[in-house]
Image (cartoon, helix red, strand yellow):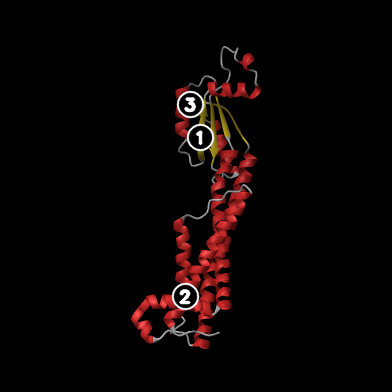
């Protein structure tokens, strides 16, 4: 393993730019070692980044659980539009409510007629038999089964409400699953991010020591060589993430990937850790 030294004259004359270029050139002089370092950094960053994307997308999709756990409030027939609207405004600030919608009798009848197809028969009703209906999409992360029962009991206590329909067991199961996912995913995300940081620092620190001992490598060149490793490894990791996302899209699985800001953060963190891990081996 040969290590080409940059002369003091060149280093002093060209400064940091010369060291950056020299550090890049040194990669080609140790191809196998460089490939190993880049692959290790790439794999560690890919695991952490891919799981972060999965975690973010599952958190976004958790809102779908709210839509699947509707609580239906059937108001008394005598309740008018103004009273129903006031009740909606009263319920809206509740911390257990994700979304609230009011269905007026005319809308409910129209949907019912279209669903069964008996337009002529049902259109003959002189008076609409359907009441005002309020649909609540609860925040499942907030509502456990016991809290859901208390919330439904509170809804039934309103004098405008005739009856309340909700699948409390479904709400309870959804709450438990989301809580379990939150705990496990945060733990795994922490482990993978910590693993990526330790791997980058460990590889940069250990291998740079070997280069110093075996090849008497110039300090400044060595630092920028490992900064290049961090840069290349992070770019490969992001490229691999995008490739996996494209393959999933072909299977009609669409994930929200990292934006430019977060991608730049991954690159900067990798470069920073690689550079300073190699730098601080010197006492």
In the rendered structure, are the residues bearing label 2 and label 1 in contact, judged by CB atoms less than 8 Å apart? no
Q: Toward which corner of the image does residue 128 lie, by quadrant? A: top right
In the rendered structure, are the residues bearing label 2 and label 3 in contact, judged by CB atoms less than 8 Å apart? no
Q: Toward which corner of the image does residue 124 lie, by quadrant? A: top right
Q: Nearer the viewer, mark 2 or mark 3?
A: 2
Q: Residues within 10 Å of mark 1 (few under 14, many from 20)?
A: some
Q: Image height check: is 231 above or below 103?
A: below
Q: List the single residue furthest toward the left.
A: 13
Horizontal placement of 66 versus 219: left or right? right
Question: Which residue bears the numbered disc 3?
Answer: 84
Instruction: Let me know if residue 190 appears in the view.
Output: no
Earlier sequence position, callout 2 versus callout 1: 2
Front residue (pair 45, 178) = 45
Secondary structure under tag 3 reads helix
Question: Which residue bears the numbered disc 1?
Answer: 100
Q: Residues within 10 Å of mark 2 (few under 14, many from 20)?
A: some
Question: Which residue bears the numbered disc 2?
Answer: 24
Front residue (pair 144, 136) = 136
Residue under the point 50% across and 80% down: 208
Residue 81 bears which disc, if any? none
In the rendered structure, are the residues bearing label 3 and label 1 in contact, judged by CB atoms less than 8 Å apart? no
Residue 246 at x, y percent in the picture: 58, 53
Earlier sequence position, callout 2 versus callout 3: 2
Front residue (pair 185, 55) = 55
Residue under the point 37% across and 76% down: 16
Q: Image height check: is 273 above or below 57?
A: below
Residue 162 at x, y percent in the picture: 57, 25
Secondary structure under tag 1 reads strand
């Amino acid at each position: 393993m040969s290590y080409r030294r940059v002369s003091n004259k060149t280093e002093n004359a060209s400064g940091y730019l010369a060291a950056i270029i020299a550090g890049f050139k040194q990669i080609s002089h140790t191809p196998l070692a460089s490939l190993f370092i880049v692959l290790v950094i790439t794999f560690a960053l890919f695991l952490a980044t891919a799981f972060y994307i999965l975690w973010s997308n599952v958190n976004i999709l958790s809102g779908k659980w709210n839509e699947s756990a509707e609580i239906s409030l059937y108001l008394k027939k005598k309740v008018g539009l103004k009273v129903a609207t006031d009740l909606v405004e009263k319920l809206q600030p509740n911390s257990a409510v994700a979304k609230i919608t009011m269905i007026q009798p005319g809308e409910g009848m129209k949907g019912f007629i279209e669903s069964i197809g008996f337009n002529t028969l049902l259109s003959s009703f002189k008076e609409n038999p359907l009441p005002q209906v309020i649909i609540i999409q609860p925040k499942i992360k907030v509502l456990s089964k016991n809290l859901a029962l208390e919330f439904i009991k509170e809804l039934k206590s309103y004098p405008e409400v005739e009856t309340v329909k909700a699948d409390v067991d479904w709400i309870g199961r959804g709450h438990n699953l989301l809580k379990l996912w939150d705990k496990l995913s945060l733990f795994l995300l922490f482990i993978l991010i910590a693993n990526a940081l330790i791997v980058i620092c460990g590889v940069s620190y250990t291998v740079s020591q070997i280069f110093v001992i075996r090849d008497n490598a110039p300090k400044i060149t060595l630092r920028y060589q490992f900064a290049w490793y961090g840069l290349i490894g992070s770019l490969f990791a992001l490229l691999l993430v995008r490739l996996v996302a494209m393959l999933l899209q072909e299977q009609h699985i669409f994930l929200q990937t990292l934006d430019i800001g977060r991608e730049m953060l991954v690159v900067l963190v990798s470069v920073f850790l690689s550079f300073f891990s190699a730098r601080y081996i010197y006492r």
